[in-house]
Amino acid sequence: MAYVTGESGVPEGCFICAATVPGSSDSLVVERAELTVTLLNRFPYSSGHLMVAPRRHAADPRELSPEEGLAVLAATRRALDAITRKMAPGGFNVGFNLGSAAGASVDHLHLHVVPRWGSDTNFMPVLADVKVLPEHLEVTAARLREALATGAGDPWEITGAGGSGAADPVERV
Ligand SMILES: [Zn+2]
């Protein structure tokens, strides 16, 4: 899919770019930081399935600056911590789908964080076009926002020349 860039410089029709701007997609957004946005997947494979993305519309991790790469991983750490405290999964699948052949549905890079439980139903979307949603998305979003707001913060700091202290200042949503 080709994106048309609007006057704002944000590709029109990209739901991840849209999520970087406060507004209509706020119900799924659990965190906005200076360089990243974290939002629930509208079609989750499990409860708490979320996506961590750089704010900038980049398609591939090789396009990220070192600061963006660190910010994406730092946001992923915060998300893992929040999900662990609120949902106590037994494990996670974390990964990128790069390119349509690999299942990417949008060319804005995002890291999937999929909580897993030992007896979960994650295989079902593969076997049938069925998604199991034990918890409403907005309930999950509220729980994770609360966990992120009360978390221990980001243990990573960028130090040295150019470092500003916090790796990626978080704006609570
Ligand atoms: Zn985008």
Image: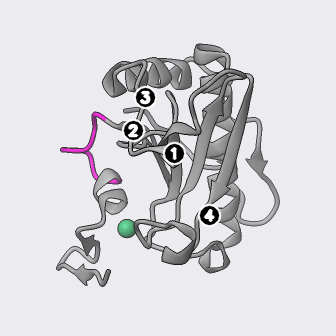
- Earlier sequence position, callout 2 versus callout 4: 4
Residue that numbered label 3 is attached to: 132
- Earlier sequence position, callout 1 versus callout 3: 1
Task: Classify mark 4: helix, strand or loop.
Answer: helix
Is residue 72 in the magenta section? Answer: no
Type of amino acid under label 2: Val
Task: Classify mark 2: helix, strand or loop.
Answer: loop
Which residue is rendered at x = 17% and y = 79% of the image?
A: 7
Residue that numbered label 1 is attached to: 127
The 10 Å Cα crowd at callout 2, few under 14, some 14 to 19, many 20 or more, is few
Which residue is rendered at x = 78% and y = 66% of the image?
A: 161
Residues at circles 2 and 3 in contact by the CB criterion of under 8 Å: yes
The reply, left or right, for residue 93 in relation to residue 137 is right
Q: Which mark is residue 68?
A: 4
The magenta stretch is 20-27
Type of amino acid under label 3: Val
> Gap in Å between the C-alphas at discs 2 and 4?
35 Å
> Gap in Å between the C-alphas at discs 1 and 4?
36 Å
The 10 Å Cα crowd at callout 3, few under 14, some 14 to 19, many 20 or more, is some
Residues at circles 2 and 1 in contact by the CB criterion of under 8 Å: yes
Question: Magenta region's main secondary structure?
Answer: loop
Q: Which mark is residue 80?
A: none
Residue that numbered label 2 is attached to: 130
Type of amino acid under label 4: Glu
Badge nearest the viewer, 1 or 3? 1
